[in-house]
Image (tube, rainbow, N blue to C red):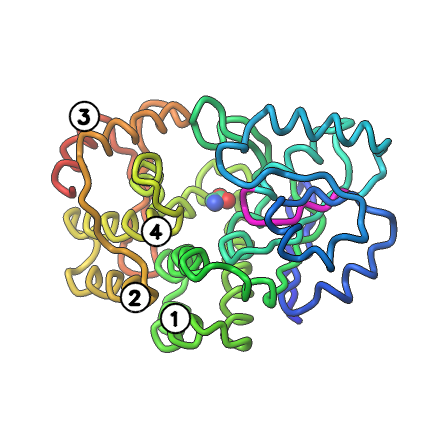
Amino acid sequence: MHQVQLTTPAGACEILVGELLSSRLQMLEQEPVLMIDENVLVQHHDLFEPFRSVIIPSGESYKTLQTVEALYRELVTLETDRSTLMVGVGGGLATDVAGFVASTFLRGTPFGFISTTLLGQVDASIGGKNGVNLDGYKNMVGNIRQPSFVWCDLSLLGTLENREYVSGIAEVIKYGLIWDIPFMDFLEESMEALLKQELSVLEHVVTTSAAIKTDVVQKDEKESDLRKILNFGHTIGHAIERHKGVLHGEAVAVGMVLAARLSHLQGLLTASEVDRVERLALSAGLPVRMKLDPEEIYQNIRKDKKKSGEDVHFVLLKGLGNTIIRPIPLPELKSIVYDLC
Ligand code: GLY
């Protein structure tokens, strides 16, 4: 088992990676309440059935304040109090909702996560961002509160659909591109084993991803500056995801390749480095291009901008393993999107 410790002024989180769940569940000191994704409960009924639980409906359309309110009411019915440990169980969607409920109910109860998807284990469950969508805008309402633990049981990944598992690899590739060239080399060498979920490779990949994210979050928990680099590939990725019905990681993969091409257009990345980014994503079985309508993409980015003020903060690669954030005013962004798509 591997351990990564995340510590910020606001809290501390122990991230554990390995095949650990059956032993760990028995070690929970008090009677917890699980907030569990409905599909995960069905799939792993034997593991989670002994615990008191409330169900988080599966699917992005349920990531709403209505769901949060329904969960508060169920917690009241269960007579939980401020000392009750809440454990969010599921992928990023479930842990985002569970973290928000736990950190606001009774002004905040202790909480941790059991992360059941690759995307959740390497990204969503780490770093303390909790929240829900509002009127179609992603993560419009939320907070940053660290769970006290995140358990990443790798054996749970075996029951994921292949497409969902591969989608998580996009975020893994992102860490190599923005932060860690040796990790990128490792991914190039080990992609086949990663796709087969070979335990030692998977362990290294999840632990390294968690450690990189931890490093970034510890330096800038509130995303005033450095943490924005974790959005590499997401500016266009979110815009694609909004309309195309593709999975998050698939949209991010296309977004990363477009961001790499933009980095090249801005003189920050060589053409062969852009090829390398594209080849790595392709080797994972991720899409690297899609037929996109530039006007639609631009309008979607504009809508997303609602969250971030006047300029769009575009994360670009300044060489591999290094980033630069360029605030791009909307009119300029429009011509960039038309150039790229
Ligand atoms: N998923 C990006 C972040 O947590 O900052």
| Residue 10 location, quadrant | top right
Which mark is first along the chain, 3 or 4?
4
Q: Amino acid at mark 4?
A: Glu
Q: Are marks 2 and 1 in contact (CB under 8 Å)?
A: yes
* Residue 187 marker: 1
Q: Is residue 83 above or below residue 72?
A: below
**Mark toward the viewer: 2 or 4:** 4
Give the Cα separation between the discs numbered 4 and 3. 27 Å
| Image location of residue 63, percent across then percent down | 54, 33
Give the Cα separation between the discs numbered 4 and 1. 17 Å
Q: Amino acid at mark 2?
A: Leu
Residue on which the image places disc 2: 280
Q: Which residues are magenta?
A: 86-93
Residue at image position (72%, 48%) is 148
Q: Amino acid at mark 3?
A: Pro
Give the Cα separation between the discs numbered 1 and 3. 37 Å
Q: Secondary structure at mark 2?
A: helix
| Residue 329 location, quadrant | top left
Give the Cα separation between the discs numbered 2 and 3. 32 Å
Give the Cα separation between the discs numbered 2 and 4. 13 Å
**270 left or right, relative to 114:** left
**Mark toward the viewer: 4 or 1:** 4
Ligand 1 under 8 Å from disc 1 Cβ: no
